Amino acid sequence: MELKKGNVPLVGPEIEKLDLVNRAESCAITLQKLVHHLEAIRITEYLEMLEKPKKIIINNFLAGIARGLGMAVGASVIFAITIEMLRRFVLFNMFGLGSFMAEFMKIIDAQK
């Protein structure tokens, strides 16, 4: 295959120049793809956080507080629902478990 520029065939150094241009364009396209992928995974934000360990500590501390409060609130809600269900079992004497639940509730109330 013969390379031509217009109607004039390219030879020697002109082919090398054209090859270098093609390689440069290929590298530019590859570099643009790489930049796009790095922006997509937010690598700059990660590198900024690594440069500022104080920010990491603060973020992790706040996340820990949020998790702790979430667990405390969630456990309280579940415990309250469980206690209410047990009281209703006692009130309605369901499934013959009323007397057992009454004893259990007395033990819980005695611990308060």
Image: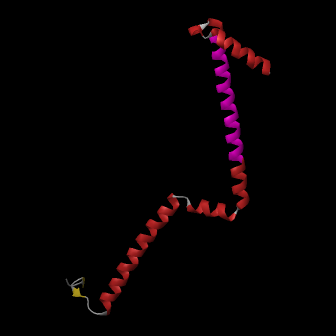
> For residue 100: magenta?
no
Classify residue 36 as left or right of residue 16: right
Query: In terms of image quadrants, where is residue 79?
Result: top right
> For residue 82: magenta?
yes
Looking at the rendering, the stretch of residues picked out in magenta corresponds to: 62-89
Image point 61% across, 6% down: which residue?
A: 93
Pick the front one: 32 or 94 = 94
> Magenta part mainly helix, strand or loop?
helix
Q: Position of residue 70 (x, y in %)?
A: 67, 36
Query: Quadrant where the N terminus lies?
Result: bottom left
Query: In terms of image quadrants, where is residue 88?
Result: top right
Query: Quadrant where the C terminus lies?
Result: top right
Pick the front one: 99 or 59 = 99
Pick the front one: 26 or 46 = 46
Image point 73% across, 52% down: which residue?
A: 58
The correct choice, above or below, for 109 with respect to 24 in the image is above
Image point 69% across, 11% down: which residue?
A: 102
Colour mapping used in the image: secondary structure
Query: In terms of image quadrants, where is residue 43?
Result: bottom right
Image point 66% across, 60% down: which residue?
A: 49
Q: Position of residue 47 (x, y in %)?
A: 62, 64
The correct choice, above or below, for 79 with respect to 13 in the image is above
